[in-house]
Image: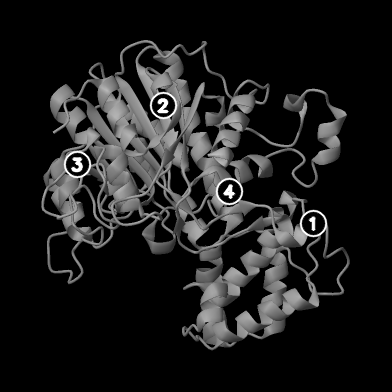
Amino acid sequence: MKRCNSKGVKIAAAFTLLSMIGSSGLFADVKIAENPTGKGKAKYVFVFVGDGMSYPQIQSAAYYAGKDAGGIVADVKKSENPSDSPAMKALSFYSFPVAGSASTYDATSFAPDSASTATSIFTGKKTHSSSINVDITKKIKYRTIAEQLRDQKGWKIGVISTVNINHATPAATYAHQASRKSNYAIGQELVASNFDYFAGGALMDPQDKKKDKTSIYDLAKNAGYKVCMDQNSASALKNGDKALVIAEKLADSNAMSYDNDRKSGEWALKDYVAKGIEVLDNKKGFFMMVEGGKIDWACHANDARSSIADTLALSEAVEEAIQFYNKHPKETLIIVTADHETGGLTIGYAGTDYNLFFRTLDGQKISYAKFDSDYVADYKKSGTSFESVMADVENLFGLKMPGSSGSDKNGGLVLTDYELGRIKKAYEKTIKNDTGRNQEEYDMYGSYEPLTITITHILNAKSGLGWTSNSHTGLPVPVFALGVGQNDFAGFYDNTDIYKKMAKLTKVVSD
């Protein structure tokens, strides 16, 4: 036993934009070794899934990362070449030669969940929301592309996620359950999969909800996995090891930290990808699924700054795969896509007219989740005064009391009396720990902490970003492709076709 440690038109417009971006000079930081032809034999396949990430999420991240995200129009006009504009910093996958788009509906909803959409991506089949790799009767099990590549081709398999490694999307590579909430059973299937490298957040219910069963971690050790719960032991993993790696620093719901909360020296998503490549690399081939799961969580909470941070972290993780591609351009395929959109994010808000002020988001120093756990929980216990809370709000989110120096318009962070009143009302509901919601309150807060989500809503609005939901939406999602068979991923198609295209390129037999 091995052990490391005990611990239509709009879509066409989007295609046009992506095509223009892909041919511009915005990619100085992204180096693809040679002109990708799409020819070769698929031997190494990466699938990056930005959970909840559609066009608004990626484009808001690109704008935020730009050199002049506070007001770009004048600078764009100064240049005859849009590629010289400081308006945006293209994400790594914007340099991919092919961009397509996929519909996301499932067997029960136009606004599906991660379980059913990931099932579509990895099996080519539709199912119920909340079901993983089973048919609509919940009796027939679907085999995944990862399982087929393991059994038919002898490939090694890696699964990485910033959320719990038995959460819906990572589970859809190896599990078959009527309900995504069957956490212990999904953990058992993780071990039984005999996949080679798992990394991410801690397992949910590792001893079942009653805590009366053998820990999944112990089952993994007994099955020959090196179970690593700190970065030193994860760093020591070598090529050919079979490993289950849990992030040393865990945050909300025992997932990895949001990237804007990540401390110096704490591994980012890209580090787990780099280690996974090292562990999996072999002559037969490997398949790696990488999920930016907390993009979705941030969007559920309408936290634009955290969504942007984790989208940029996913972009950096893709760069690790690009480096591998550069060494094996005739054998590697990289796909970057999403399961669905979350939050109904839009770039544009009624209160700012046509203007966007992304630099206002620099005022946010902490994710909504960390604010809840490190500050709001204490406010409730101590009955912290509104004045003291507002001092924290200015320090952590940049929002200033009315009358402070600065402006409340055009990217200013001074609150209006109306905005302060909204925060005061939400504070009073939070401080009383009042979890009841009438219709108006549900529209404003969803199931989230009233104080926190009101703060992020106001900050987002001042930047020019708006939200329609705390849930998933029916938007199509982008599909970017680089490498062997890349041209197959152009156009508009259903998410089930992503599996079909991968199966064709890897020559696996569907079963």
Between disc 3 and disc 1, the foreground one is: 1
Residue at image point 79% right, 41% down: 72
Q: Earlier in the sequence, mark 4 or mark 3?
A: 3
Give, as a three-letter code, the residue at label 2: Phe
| Residue identified by numbered label 4 | 308
Depth check: 484 or 255 in front?
Answer: 484
Q: Earlier in the sequence, mark 1 or mark 2?
A: 1
| Residue identified by numbered label 1 | 411
Give, as a three-letter code, the residue at label 1: Gly
| Residue identified by numbered label 2 | 489
Depth check: 107 or 220 in front?
Answer: 107
Q: Position of residue 454 (x, y in %)?
A: 62, 71
Question: On the image, which quarter does residue 2 sit in?
Answer: top left
Between disc 2 and disc 4, the foreground one is: 2
Crowd band around label 1 with a 10 angstrom C-alpha radius: few (<14), some (14–19), many (20+): many
Up the image or down, 455 lies above or below 112; here it is: below
Q: Which mark is residue 225?
A: 3
Crowd band around label 4 with a 10 angstrom C-alpha radius: few (<14), some (14–19), many (20+): many
- Name the outermost residue toward the front: 8
Give, as a three-letter code, the residue at label 4: Ile
Q: Secondary structure at mark 4?
A: helix
What's the distance in space between the residues labelled 3 and 1, CA to CA?
A: 51 Å
Give, as a three-letter code, the residue at label 3: Tyr
Q: Secondary structure at mark 3?
A: loop
Question: On the image, which quarter does residue 418 sit in?
Answer: bottom right
Q: Position of residue 498 (x, y in %)?
A: 34, 33
Between disc 2 and disc 3, the foreground one is: 2
Q: Earlier in the sequence, mark 1 or mark 4?
A: 4
Q: Position of residue 195 (x, y in %)?
A: 21, 37
Q: Is residue 5 visible?
A: yes
Q: Earlier in the sequence, mark 2 or mark 4?
A: 4
